[in-house]
């Protein structure tokens, strides 16, 4: 099912900034689940949070659900993982890539922010100006740093794509 989020806007902006994405670049963000009740629950939760965040009394209730700074324990974070699968088609090729790592909400986010700062400070990066995305600012240099930091990027499948109408 389509997934509402800001990633699509950021990735589409990268596509406009970087010629290598090509003139026909499009991006769609989906979330997969094996059971309809899970899909309905995700949609309902996201909708409730979006609506609740817009209405002051509901927003106050949402903000009281967790104390600032409260988060998962170190043990929970150590057991948490993420996997994101990307499907890309361009020209006559179709590729499937997978990115995976540890706890996405805390551990890996801190890793990504730290490695991005290191990349900006020390890597030989393309000259950019104005608002840019990480792909335009750091690209492969950041990916190399993330791999060294333990985040996995793997090519799962590469094949000739089906002709498009």
Image (spheres, rainbow, N blue to C red):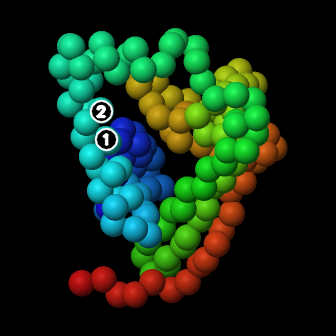
User: Which residue sits at x=33%, y=66%?
Assistant: 36
Mark 1 Cα-neighbour bin, 10 Å: few <14, some 14–19, many ≥20: some
Q: Give the left or right position of residue 160, taking residue 39 as reference.
A: right
Q: Residue 15 at x, y = what percent? A: 40, 49
Position of 53 relative to 145 (above/below): above
Snapshot quadrant of residue 95: bottom right
Q: Quadrant of the N terminus?
A: bottom left
Residue 46 numbered mark, or none:
1
Q: Quadrant of the C terminus?
A: bottom left
Snapshot quadrant of residue 29: bottom left
Residue 140 numbered mark, or none:
none
Q: Secondary structure at mark 1?
A: helix
Q: Residue 75 at x, y = what percent? A: 76, 35
Is residue 11 at least partly visible in the picture?
A: yes
Judging depth in this view, the residue of 74 and 65 nearest the camera is: 65
Judging depth in this view, the residue of 162 and 47 nearest the camera is: 47
User: Which residue sits at x=67%, y=44%?
Assistant: 80
Q: Residue 5 at x, y = what percent? A: 35, 42
Which residue bears the numbered disc 2? Answer: 49
Q: Give the left or right position of residue 160, taking residue 29 as reference.
A: right
User: Which residue sits at x=51%, y=86%?
Assistant: 160
How far apart are labels 1 and 2 at the CA level? 5 Å
Q: Residue furthest right?
A: 148
Q: Give the left or right position of residue 87, taking residue 76 as reference.
A: left
User: Which residue sits at x=70%, y=36%?
Assistant: 77
Kindly check if marks 1 and 2 are in contact, taking CB atoms under 8 A apart as contact: yes
Snapshot quadrant of residue 71: top right
Q: Secondary structure at mark 2?
A: helix
Q: Residue 100 at x, y = what percent? A: 66, 53
Is residue 141 at least partly visible in the picture?
A: no
């Amino acid at each position: 099912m389509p997934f509402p989020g800001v990633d699509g806007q950021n990735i589409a902006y990268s596509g406009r900034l970087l010629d290598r994405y090509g003139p026909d670049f499009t991006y769609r963000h989906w979330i997969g689940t094996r059971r309809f009740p899970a899909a309905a629950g995700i949609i309902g939760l996201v909708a409730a949070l979006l609506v609740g965040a817009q209405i002051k009394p509901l927003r106050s209730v949402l903000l009281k659900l967790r104390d600032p700074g409260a988060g998962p324990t170190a043990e929970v974070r150590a057991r948490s993982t993420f996997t994101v699968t990307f499907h890309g088609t361009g020209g006559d090729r179709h590729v499937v890539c997978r990115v995976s790592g540890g706890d996405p909400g805390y551990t890996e986010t801190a890793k990504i922010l730290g490695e991005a700062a290191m990349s900006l400070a020390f890597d030989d990066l393309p000259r950019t100006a104005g608002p840019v995305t990480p792909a335009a600012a750091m690209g492969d240099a950041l990916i190399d740093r993330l791999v060294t930091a333990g985040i996995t990027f793997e090519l799962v499948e590469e094949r000739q794509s089906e002709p498009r109408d």
